[in-house]
Image: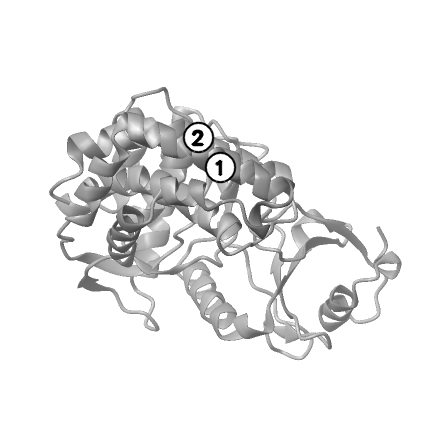
């Protein structure tokens, strides 16, 4: 649609900040179905020159600046898969609209994501992630160091919390206002089913294993943390080549194993097939560029298995306890259902391998 047809004052102000009074066409993008951000593509007539504008809460400005610094460093280090951050006409890469929203603009990344990559695509994606990690470790703003991974520490804390008040408790207390609409009702139904499944497959035992972990120090550095299959774009003219990696706004300091676990875990695999077995070639491609330490290699499947349990727990508590709501009902329920389906496999893996991380 033409920008002039939009009643979003923040978007109109953002377009003016980057493009002046030009007549432009904007196309809403699906973006992140869960962040609540406005994400649009600004069409310029040349896909290579198109912009992606994204909104954030005003309080996010310092974090946006940190992410922009990381992206700039990665591109300067030769990682051209990272979209270029574009400065507004005022010279800043972040613009605050009159309504208080903060906006950024990055170059539109041309490419196609695939939910089920071929073996060649999986290797290319893993190798790209390895190059991003090697470059990120040299960013002077956040020097690499050795320490306990925040992702592991959070999971240990969450396991303790779930042992104290788990899904049986949530199911028994899901009758309040947070479950009064369609999404709340859907989650109340699913938490009851997940609680029953958890009792059947040994969830409590898996949680006790996680809670008793003694996290070993590993290399810590800037990582993406939330890289899914949909964030890796392959070139149209060569679908075995990674053309872009998008959405860096979950980036933080953690172990690189988080990115491998998240990306490989977002790809399909058969039931009861371990992550490291199914995607061993991708891990090998990663290690050809950035060898994993023994602890990092061990963390990849552990982080994947625990992400299933604690990701599900997050969704239940966000919706049923905190009363959060998400604009897109179907993707939210689909995400939760996917985690529920993977729950028995994750619990079984942790009960067999959970100790000794």
Residue drawn at x 25%, y 47% is: 290
Residue 113 visible in the snapshot: no
101 relative position to 352: left or right: right
Residue drawn at x 30%, y 41% is: 306
132 relative position to 90: left or right: left
Circle 1 SS class: helix
In the rendered image, the vertical position of residue 118 relative to residue 209, given as above or below: above
Query: Dot 1 surroundings within 10 Å: few (below 14), some, or many (20 or more)?
Result: many
Q: Name the one closer to the observer, 326 or 38.
A: 326
Residue drawn at x 44%, y 30% is: 193
Q: Name the one closer to the observer, 342 or 65.
A: 342
Residue 319 place in picture, x, y as percent: 52, 49
Q: Name the one closer to the observer, 254 or 354.
A: 354
In the rendered image, the vertical position of residue 18 relative to residue 150, given as above or below: below
Residue 204 place in picture, x, y as percent: 24, 38
Circle 2 SS class: helix
Residue under numbered circle 2: 193
Q: Furthest-bottom residue in view?
A: 90
The C terminus is located in which quarter? top left
- The label number, if any, that marks residue 155 in the structure image: none
Way the structure is coloured: one colour
Residue 105 place in picture, x, y as percent: 63, 63
Residue under numbered circle 1: 336
């Amino acid at each position: 649609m033409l920008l002039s047809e939009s009643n979003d004052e923040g978007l109109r102000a953002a377009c003016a900040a980057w493009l002046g009074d030009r007549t432009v066409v904007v196309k809403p993008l699906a973006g992140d179905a869960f962040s609540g951000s406005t994400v649009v593509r600004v069409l310029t007539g040349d896909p290579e020159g198109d912009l992606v504008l994204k909104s954030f809460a005003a309080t996010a400005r310092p974090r946006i600046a940190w992410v922009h610094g990381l992206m700039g460093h990665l591109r300067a280090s030769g990682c051209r898969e990272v979209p270029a951050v574009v400065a507004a006409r005022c010279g800043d890469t972040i613009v605050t609209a009159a309504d208080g929203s903060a906006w950024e603009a990055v170059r539109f990344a041309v490419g196609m994501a695939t939910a089920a990559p071929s073996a060649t695509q999986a290797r290319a994606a893993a190798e790209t992630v390895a190059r991003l990690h090697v470059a990120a470790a040299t960013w002077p703003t956040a020097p690499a160091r050795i320490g306990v991974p925040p992702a592991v520490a959070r999971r240990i804390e969450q396991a303790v919390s779930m042992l104290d008040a788990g899904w049986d408790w949530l199911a028994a207390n899901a009758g309040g206002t947070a479950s009064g609409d369609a999404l709340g009702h859907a989650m109340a139904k699913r938490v009851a089913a997940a609680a029953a499944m958890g009792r059947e497959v040994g969830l409590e035992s898996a949680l006790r294993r996680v809670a008793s972990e003694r996290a070993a120090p590993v290399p810590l550095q800037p990582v993406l943390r939330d890289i899914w299959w949909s964030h890796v774009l392959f070139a149209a003219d060569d679908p075995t080549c990674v053309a872009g990696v998008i959405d860096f706004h979950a980036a933080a300091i953690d172990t690189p194993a988080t990115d491998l676990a998240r990306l490989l875990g977002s790809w399909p695999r058969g039931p009861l097939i371990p992550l490291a077995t199914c995607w061993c070639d991708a891990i090998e491609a990663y290690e050809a560029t950035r060898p994993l330490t023994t602890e990092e290699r061990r963390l990849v499947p552990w982080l994947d298995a625990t992400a299933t349990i604690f990701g599900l727990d997050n969704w239940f508590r966000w919706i049923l306890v905190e009363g959060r709501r998400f604009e897109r009902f179907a993707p939210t329920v689909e995400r939760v259902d996917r985690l529920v389906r993977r729950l028995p496999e994750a619990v079984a893996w942790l009960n067999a391998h959970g100790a000794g991380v």
